[in-house]
Image (cartoon, rainbow, N blue to C red):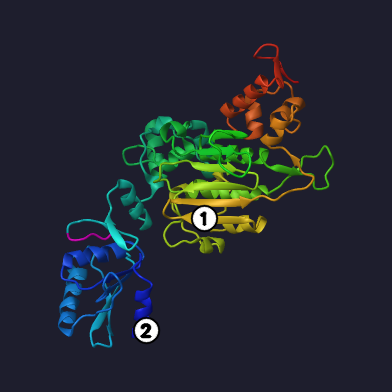
Amino acid sequence: MNLLQLIDLVASGEDGARQFKSDIRNAESLASEMAAFANAEGGSILIGVTDNGSIKGLESSDVSRINQLISNAASHLVRSPLTVQTENILLENRNVVIVLTVPKGIDKPYFDKNGVIWLKCGADKRRVNTKEELRRLFQITNQFHADELPSKAEVDSLDKLRFRDFLKTTYQQEYPETDEKLKKLLQNMNLATDTGKLNLACVLLFAEKPEWIVPQFVVKAVRFPGNEIHQSEYLDIEDFTGALGAIFEGAMAFLMRNMHKVQAGRGINAPGTPEIPPVVFEELLVNALIHRDYFVSAPIRLFLFDNRIEIISPGHLPNNLTVAKIKTGNSNIRNPTLVSYVAKGLLPYRGLGSGIKRAIDAWPEIDFIDDRDGCLFTAIVHRKTIDGSVESSVESSVESSVEIDNPVLEQFRLNPELTLHALAKTLGISLRATEKRVANLQEKKQLKHIGPKKGGYWQVL
């Protein structure tokens, strides 16, 4: 680096990768700065530059003293020791600016002499003071992952039918005869802790009622009128709970019923084609479910507006990933246990970082927002104005007293003796959601049940 480059660098000011120090006399303070940079993406400390950007430099007598102090701090006051580099830049007044470069750490987390973990916070630094931050730091270094977190659930919380079918289909193995054998099997599959507690991956995939154990990890979907979020107005709303497979199917069904259908040259009795290819939402929903940050206790949100559809996931992109990188197919697995089992057919997941590319290829009108301050990742799928389309959304059903395109009414027209359990399976949604929709249609006098509860039939009015 020459003097002109130094001047340009200082002119850009301090930030998360660059800090100014007029002088250094405290080795412990310097060690904490080094640890913060190493726990982040690395950075530089310009010694001989004041906080306001004035380049005064250091006298020759200070240079040897500070170099010795740097060596002592990096070798003895940071755990694990750091290998840093220094470069001396000569100023016109014959003073020197020391550019101290701290690399991104490969043995995170780094501690100072007192065992404190420091993180960069803009141009400053702060202590790690929550379990969530500490867990995320260990997650970045592949030492610990959120999907391995132990839950309070025991083996009796498993959905035995779902897990039995998975064992038989995937491993050609029978369901264990005893709880002790089941516990051992789950431990061997990395789905339970040494004490027999189900971990988060197991709960999300195979528990009978995951929402009772981890109620925060659900999908909340809302269809708003217009293009803005309303506090009290909505056209359709539903929370999707259960195992990840059920959540995925429910969210997909919500999207399909709230999107326009295009005739696309088909006959009047043929179902329309969704305005946006379903594969787009298959990829984006699966990506949200398995790559979200499960250290953040918040639901995935699915918002539908007239001009766009937003899928908002807790957690920004991990490590060095950027929006540009994921568009080219780069990936970083945040929840490896979850991914390993989803890839066995539990969700339509293809892996290899191809999901985002596949979604963009099918529908280029997608924007991604990586909000690192808000710890959110948002996929925005832009809708197009479709002339002559037939809407099957809730908006059209509210305006129409007959609700010709309502999927519940369509199924009962085809089979008046259809049970609610069978209807839920056909629509790909939960039984509770099905009951709510049927009750709503009954209240609006569009559907009526004739005869006894068992053995009767449904009449579309």
Q: Which residues are magenta?
A: 109-113
| Residue in front for this viewpoint, 337 or 225 | 225
358 is within the stretch colored magenta = no
Type of amino acid at the residue the image marks with label 2: Leu
Q: Position of residue 60 (x, y in %)?
A: 18, 84
Q: How many marks?
A: 2
Left or right position of 342 against 27 = right
Q: Determine whether 181 is above or below 331 in the image.
A: above
Q: Position of residue 377 (x, y in %)?
A: 49, 52
Left or right position of 373 against 59 = right
Q: Position of residue 384 (x, y in %)?
A: 70, 51
Q: Position of residue 424 (x, y in %)?
A: 63, 29
**Residue with the mark numbered 1:** 369
Type of amino acid at the residue the image marks with label 1: Ile
Q: Where does the C terminus fall, quadrant-wise?
A: top right
Left or right position of 189 against 63 = right
* Residue depth check, mark 2 versus mark 1: number of the one nearer the observer: 2
Residue 4: which disc?
2
Residue lying at 17% horizontally and 57% vertically, measured from the top left = 114
Q: Main secondary structure of the magenta part?
A: loop
